[in-house]
Image: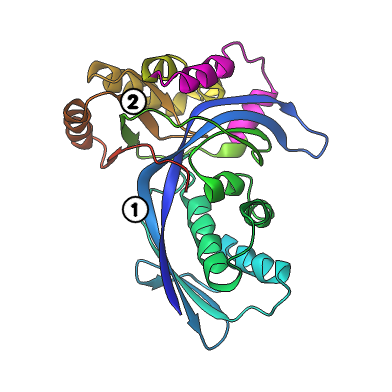
Amino acid sequence: MERRRTAPAKINLALDILGIRTDGYHDMKMVMQTISLCDTVTVEETAEGFHLRTDGDFIPAGKKTLEQRAAEAFFASIDRPMPGLTVTLEKVTPAYAGLGGGSADVAALLRILREAYAPDMPTAELERIGFTVGSDMPFCVRGGTCLAEGRGEVLTDLPPLPDCWLVLCKPDFGIPTPTLFARVDGGELTCRPDIGGMVAALAAGDVDGVAARLGNVFEEVLPEAYHEVFTIKRRLLDLGALNAAMSGSGPTVFGIFREEETAQQAKETLKKRFAQTYLAKPVRKL
């Protein structure tokens, strides 16, 4: 058995943090969107054990990867022993970028396992399995355009983002997510995204209305060391984006463009300074 699936990345069109929960996690309210930037995941049944390779290199042994934990949870849910599996990741989506690349890889693995071993499993059950290993996983399993609440696992399908082009640009640093959550907890957020307005704009098929309401509360607490994020936002606007925002906990910034030619030119311009710059489109439900 060898099966292959794409693992599309995600962006956060809107991201709000409502507060800390009693379990120590945060209550979130987000509008999430699957995009065409993707890795490729291949699963092959082998003699024994679980092996993960990425771009030709084996991951060092030791701590279980998210992929292994998800596979074990999947086979536990269908009450059968896990066969030997080799999972190969062909990476395109940058890591630690706010684009959910790792979660998308795990979600693709789960979709492959369902296809091969439990084709009648409801998507809700696959989302539940994914949630045992990560908060972004249920959305990455479902895909499309969703309102995500709770820790990210309470999903409501939304009308799709109208056709447009996305330019994504990741600066040459990562941002520790716990640092940003700590800064949110220690301050008072004053600039929250209009998520209700964005949902209405999606329902109306109004890409300008969606773009006008892009927002991410993490930007408000971004330490000065990471302010190149704002430089990239300004460049995207100068290059013709309807609007731009940071995705997730960053540092990737995306801009929404109406025309492919304008987006392509913006990508080429930014790529001269930022190697990890990409052109993508929204993807409907997986």
Q: Residue furthest bottom?
A: 47
Q: State the SS at label 2.
A: strand
Identity of the amino acid at label 1?
Val
Q: Residue at x 50, y 65 (%)?
A: 112
Residue stretch rendered in magenta on the structure: 179-206
Q: State the SS at label 1.
A: loop
**Quadrant of res 34:** top left
Which one is earlier in the sequence, the residue at label 2 or at label 1? 1
Separation (CA) of disc 2 from disc 1 = 20 Å
Q: Residue furthest front?
A: 120
Q: Nearer the viewer, residue 179 or 243?
A: 243
Residue 190 horizontal/vertical position (percent): 61, 11
For the question of whether residue 214 can be seen, the reply is no
Q: Is residue 200 above or below residue 9?
A: above
Does the magenta run of residues contain 197? yes
Q: Which mark is residue 60?
A: none
Q: Are marks 2 and 1 in contact (CB under 8 Å)?
A: no
Q: Nearer the viewer, residue 83 or 236?
A: 83
Q: Nearer the viewer, residue 78 or 137?
A: 78
Q: Which residue is mark 1?
A: 92
Point out the frontmost of discs 2 and 1. 2
Q: Is residue 229 above or below residue 59?
A: above
Q: Which mark is residue 256?
A: 2
Q: Residue at x 45, y 32 (%)?
A: 160
**Quadrant of res 76:** bottom right
Count of marks, rendered view: 2
Residue 265 horizontal/vertical position (percent): 16, 30
Q: Residue at x 63, y 50 (%)?
A: 134
Question: Within 10 angstroms of label 1, few (less than 14), some, or many (20 or more) residues?
Answer: some
Identity of the amino acid at label 2?
Ile
Q: Residue furthest right?
A: 22
